[in-house]
Image (cartoon, rainbow, N blue to C red):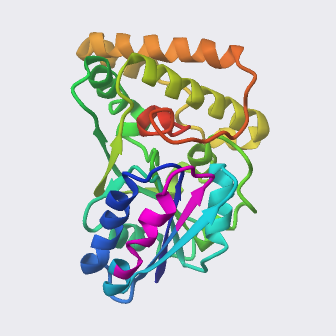
Amino acid sequence: MRTAVIIPARNEEHSISTCLRSVIAQHDSLRPGQSVQIVLAANGCSDKTADAARALIGEAAEHGIDLTVLDLAEGGKTRALNAAEAETDADALVYLDSDVTIEAGMLAALGKALDTDQPRYASGTPELVHGDNWVTRKYSETWKNLPFVADGVSGCGLYATNKAGRARWDAWPEILSDDKFIRLNFEPDERVQVSPRFFWPVPEGFSALVRARTRWCKGNTQVEGLYPDLQDFNDSRKMPLSAAFGLLLKRPVSLTVFTTIYFIAKVKAAWSKDAKNNWSGGAERSGIAGSSSGM
């Protein structure tokens, strides 16, 4: 099985090496016969993201991994995904955010989950990474206990599919919420979560979380409007009353922080008419609320 890791990146000069090295380090835990290709698509960068990635081509080759670096003039995450996919004919496609790292065994586990002729979607186990900001900690406590995160396969920051799954749509559309779009192309029983963790940074502080969450709301509204036929598979749209009551009893302060940010972002998104795919780096994109499907 040939596995391609596709990494879209914009202005990640200072973090892209850490992400790439976590992928390169997978070489000694791969399945027998599994090979790895990395395609990094630097899109619309104003820094040296592409140069930082090229500096690791030799290191990757030493471990039998082919690293291809694309330096695209135009920005846009889904444009970067399309360009990167054109560079590979892999059996399994793993899409990784450029500020996310993965632990040993991730590619082997994803490869096993996707090694079938049937359409499959897979992700790892999310591990939230944040500093000591009180608001961020409380927000994260609720997010990771939401039913669709705790009991489902969220795919925020890392998701994967096989050839049969990727055949369900043509080119990536120009949308904000690529991770939600791909997840809704699969029924719940076609989604697999593997045990290795991926480490996903969370925006720090109230304002950063509101900005990122607003983007999430825009992305979800966009997907719901453009692809109403996919909403039958949307297991994150509503939280059962019993689950909400359970969270209120266990974590009243955390739930209050989460819902406050949620509703402020919802209002801001409703008033905004900007639904363009202006995907960018930094706190607005990174972490749980920056990935457009967020929760």
The percent position of residue 33, horizontal first and vertical second, equals 38, 89
Is-magenta flag for residue 74? no
Q: Which residue is drawn at 65% across and 61% down?
A: 72
Left or right relative to 242: residue 166? right
Left or right relative to 22: residue 95? right
Residue 95 visible in the displayed image: no
Q: State the residue in front, 253 or 290.
A: 290
Left or right relative to 262: residue 227? right
Location of residue 90 by image quarter: bottom right
The percent position of residue 197, horizontal first and vertical second, equals 29, 54
The percent position of residue 143, horizontal first and vertical second, equals 37, 29
Q: Which residue is drawn at 38% across and 22% down?
A: 243
Q: Residue at x 67, y 66 (%)?
A: 83
The stretch in magenta equals 40-58
Query: Where 225 falls versus 71 (above or below)?
Result: above
Q: Which residue is drawn at 49% across and 17% down?
A: 262
The percent position of residue 53, horizontal first and vertical second, equals 44, 66
Location of residue 273 by image quarter: top right
Query: Where 87 falls versus 212 (above or below)?
Result: below
Most distant residue in the bottom direction: 33
Location of residue 20 by image quarter: bottom left
